Image: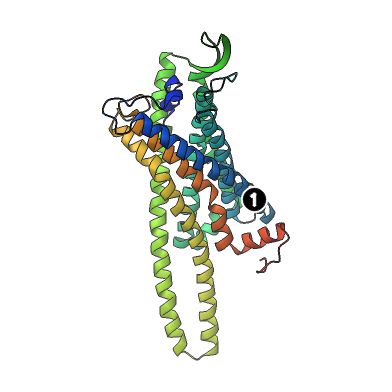
Amino acid sequence: MTLNDTQPSQELDNVSSSSMGGDLITGAQLYFILLTTSAFTQVFSIGGVITNVINIAVFVKLGFNETSNISLLTLALCDLLSTILTIWGTLCVTPGFSDAELPFLPTEIAQLTGGALSMFVLRCSAWVTAFISFERCLCILIPLKVKKWVTPKMSTAVVLAISITTIGPYIGVHWRWTFMWKFLPARNATILGVTVVDTPFLNLKEKIDNIVFGAIQPIIAFFTVLVCTVFLVVYLRRSSQWRKSMASAGGKTGGGDNSFQFQMKQNISRKEEKVVRLVTSIATIFIVCYTPNTLMILHMAIFPSFSLFGQHRNTFLMIYLVSVLANSVSASVNIFIYYNMGTRYRNALRLMFHFDSEDSVK
């Protein structure tokens, strides 16, 4: 979603209103979708808070000698913040809460403190995932050089740079959208809302930010992950075929030294393949769950009427709600991948909860 979509609007408090002409989704359908997706989004987001707190604790316990732990810790931090913001934003647009006589306008406050910020955090997650995938591709293509280039310090610098360039621009949102006390005659009360600062400079800045941070940045991250994932999948298939052919050839050679060398190569291949499978699984879930958001961005660029204030507003909101649900799912399921595919992660987690360890910590 672009910065322009964070514009405060009383219309969001009336999602059950009639559909605009030409829209595929009626107001009643949108209201039902809102109730349904909000319930599932809250469930997955609460689960995401729990699982990512566990992920953060485990990666801190494992330490930062391995570059992958630094990247995965950053991803867990982004997912934790994203799920917290999603819980808040979803609550504010839920019928009942949004209609309550609160000292603030829930929809307006949520758009600035929840929806807008969560989009920036989501872009950070996207670029961290792209970095993890790209790093693994380099480990396959130039393994010896990567070990010299990609150090813990370098990885820390990269994830910090990603965080600053993806979340940092959110500060600019407050140059145009600011908090303001508003008097509502219907309630005879002054409550907190959001207002727009309209100046030529801020208007131009917003248009540039929409293009750079709202469209180009997330789309590049998405296709980077997509290309790297395709490469990793091809590598896994070739690695599996190589291991089968070597196993067949190794069975015919009876020499002790040759057999030992073959076994070592096979073990190294399996260890590398295990890491690649983990990264591929993370990237695949990201691609599936981030696709609705990417399609929404591309559709907005092609069809101007497809926006929060355009002719197809209800359809836009439906896809946006689905993308929020998909992102909450993505942020909550990584723990299962880590546990099933990461031996060291599984051991650290079992030891943390005082379970008997099945594997030896290496």
- Residue 203 left/right relative to 115: left
Q: Is residue 4 above or below residue 215?
A: above
Q: Residue furthest bottom?
A: 254
Tag 1, which secondary structure?
helix
Q: Residues within 10 Å of mark 1 (few under 14, many from 20)?
A: some
x%, y% of residue 196? 47, 16
Q: According to the image, label 1 marks what residue? A: 54
For badge 1, the amino acid type reads Ile
In the image, residue 317 above or below residue 261: above
Total marks shown come to 1
Whether residue 105 is visible, yes or no, is yes
Q: Quarter of the image containing the C terminus?
A: bottom right
Quarter of the figure with residue 198: top left
Q: Position of residue 226 (x, y in %)?
A: 39, 51
**Left or right of residue 309, residue 353 in this image:** right
Please indicate, yes or no, whether residue 1 appears anywhere in the rendered image.
Answer: no
Quarter where residue 299 is shown: top left
Residue 286, how many percent across, how many down?
Answer: 45, 49
Residue at point 52%, 62% (across, down):
275
Identity of the residue drawn at 59% across and 60% down: 339
